[in-house]
């Protein structure tokens, strides 16, 4: 107990709590939680320490105040233990009503913030947005740290809905607030959302630069930011993998996995998944599936509900099955997962995997293709391509385009396949996106050679994907507009319209306007 008092006098609260537990003084340990806030959950092993406290002293002692229940609920959410977190959040209702209106409003606002977070993690988008939005209105200015967590969850809600501009606006507001408080720790937490937004837009290099800067900030601080450094490493591993930087990806994933496991962060899952894909890239499929089993075992040992990890685990498993040509098994798994995201009781994808549902869709299309259902596969892919274009999800657009090229190739449409493939490779090159091409080669080793297409082909102004302006011109051509009418509509010269029309024909490999429109529709460009 003296050691506990010594550390408490120096405001080393984690060490003080640990020594209180060692001295069999759980009441003292719980009383020290008054010095913790939201920020402390992202420092050192504090989240793991709170979980140990929960295991050692039980919930009864932690029910002494709404503050201790909030901290425990936050640690349980961080660990992915949603059912236990739900009980802690519900228990906060025991402290209502409060003696005055201000305290009542404060307690309700904190409850709404955590209830909104829980709904967010459970895939209940409408309730998440409702409660998080109301919490932002109700939380006092001194609860700025909890407000930042709400902003982050609302940003991810916007990303899940494909509302990239709204996500950007929310993220900017949050970053301004974090910087006004001088909190580098939570600023780095918000930069994870910023990087996720950039990745969705296809700006992989910028996303990694944002994370590298945040990592540098955190490593320069006196405090131990290992929980956030672990998450940053996992996200940088994903970015490196997508860009074909396999050695860097492996290092990031291993580092992130190590930190996440030590901090009891459920996102350790994504370290295993990333390493499994890297193994599959080397055709080490047995090792890859071993990693998936290890990930599942860890989730089960830590009492993490299946809804947190099952869908993404099956999606990656199906990804590996498709690389092996095991279409039937992949299709069964993908349909099983997709049922959770469709229909009356549909839920959202987990926050860390914003592109999970469209990836399931295009992988299911490949499974259909391999089983001879060409029409269904093509229609599914064209639908996904249109959605990706409408939402500005360029990285996803590349993946779907490559799957569409594979569909045309296997259905014997070599000319169309080559044209679609060239468009996909050109956009992949612009985005520095290499992993989807790597996986295409694993699935169809001879496809690029047989179509006479190779990565890194020199692109002149009359090759590559259609630009946004060219797509605009093509849309007006499809409506029957003349060159003069297009010039007037877009406020450009007649010469510029003719130049666009020539480039459109060149990129699509046709000679006439009507052919360009028909071919663009076949490629899913319109």
Image: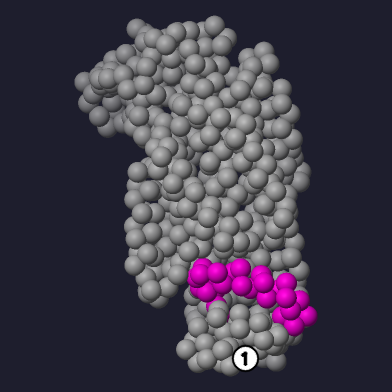
- On the rendered structure, is 484 left or right of 199? left
Front in this rendered view, residue 182 or 8: 8
Give SS at disc 1. Answer: loop
How far across and how far down the image is residue 36, in percent?
A: 56, 80
- On the rendered structure, is 223 left or right of 86? left
How far across and how far down the image is residue 84, in percent?
A: 74, 65
Q: Quadrant of residue 359?
A: top right
- On the rendered structure, is 323 left or right of 498? right
What predominant SS class does the magenta segment belong to?
helix
How far across and how far down the image is residue 275, in percent?
A: 53, 41
Report the residue at 52% width, 22% height from top: 442
Q: Which residues are magenta?
A: 36-63
Report the residue at 39% width, 29% height from top: 428
Query: Where 155 sits versus 97, above or below?
Result: above
Front in this rendered view, residue 273 or 93: 273
Q: Is residue 526 visible?
A: no
Q: Is residue 469 visible?
A: yes
Query: Where 434 sits versus 46, above or below?
Result: above
């Amino acid at each position: 107990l003296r050691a506990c008092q010594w550390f408490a006098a120096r405001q080393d609260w984690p060490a003080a709590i640990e020594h209180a537990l060692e001295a069999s003084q759980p009441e003292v340990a719980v009383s020290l939680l008054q010095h913790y806030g939201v920020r402390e959950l992202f420092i050192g092993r504090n989240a793991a320490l709170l979980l140990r406290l929960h295991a050692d002293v039980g919930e009864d002692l932690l029910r002494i105040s709404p503050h201790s229940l909030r901290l425990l609920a936050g640690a349980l959410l961080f660990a992915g233990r949603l059912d236990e977190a739900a009980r802690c959040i519900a228990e906060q209702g025991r402290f209502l009503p409060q003696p005055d209106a201000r305290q009542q409003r404060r307690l309700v606002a904190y409850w709404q913030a955590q209830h909104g977070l829980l709904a967010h993690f459970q895939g209940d988008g409408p309730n998440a947005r409702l409660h998080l939005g109301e919490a932002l209105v109700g939380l006092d200015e001194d609860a700025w740290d909890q407000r930042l967590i709400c902003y982050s969850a609302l940003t991810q809600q916007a990303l899940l809905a494909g509302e990239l501009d709204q996500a950007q606006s929310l993220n900017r507001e949050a970053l301004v607030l974090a910087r006004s408080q001088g909190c580098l720790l939570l600023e780095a937490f918000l930069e994870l959302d910023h990087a996720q937004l950039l990745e969705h837009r296809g700006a992989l290099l910028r996303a990694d630069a944002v994370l590298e800067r945040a990592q540098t900030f955190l490593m320069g601080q006196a405090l131990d930011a290992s929980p956030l450094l672990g998450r940053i490493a996992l996200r940088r591993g994903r970015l490196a993998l997508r860009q074909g930087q396999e050695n860097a990806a492996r290092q990031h994933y291993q580092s992130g996995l190590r930190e996440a496991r030590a901090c009891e962060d459920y996102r350790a899952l994504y370290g295993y998944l990333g390493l499994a894909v890297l193994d599959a890239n080397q055709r080490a499929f047995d090792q890859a599936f071993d990693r998936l089993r290890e990930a599942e075992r860890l989730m089960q040992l830590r009492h993490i509900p299946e809804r947190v990890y099952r869908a993404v685990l099956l999606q990656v498993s199906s990804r590996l099955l498709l690389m092996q040509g095991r279409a039937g098994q992949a299709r069964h798994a993908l349909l099983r997962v997709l049922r959770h995201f469709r229909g009356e009781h549909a839920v959202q994808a987990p926050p860390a995997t914003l592109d999970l549902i469209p990836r399931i869709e295009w992988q299911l299309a490949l499974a259909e293709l391999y089983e001879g259902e060409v029409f269904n596969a093509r229609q599914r892919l064209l639908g996904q391509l249109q959605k990706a274009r409408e939402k500005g999800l360029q990285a996803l657009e590349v993946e779907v385009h490559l799957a569409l090229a594979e569909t045309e190739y296997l259905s014997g449409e070599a000319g169309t396949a080559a044209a679609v493939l060239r468009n996909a490779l050109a956009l992949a090159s612009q985005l520095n996106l290499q992993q989807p091409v790597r996986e295409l080669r694993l699935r169809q080793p001879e496809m690029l050679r047989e179509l006479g297409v190779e990565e890194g082909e020199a692109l002149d102004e009359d090759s590559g994907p259609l630009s946004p302006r060219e797509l605009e011109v093509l849309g007006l051509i499809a409506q029957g507009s003349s060159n003069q009418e297009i010039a007037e509509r877009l406020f450009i010269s007649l010469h510029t319209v003719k130049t666009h029309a020539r480039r459109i024909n060149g990129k699509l490999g046709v000679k006439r306007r009507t052919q360009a429109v028909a071919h663009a529709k076949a490629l899913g460009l319109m």
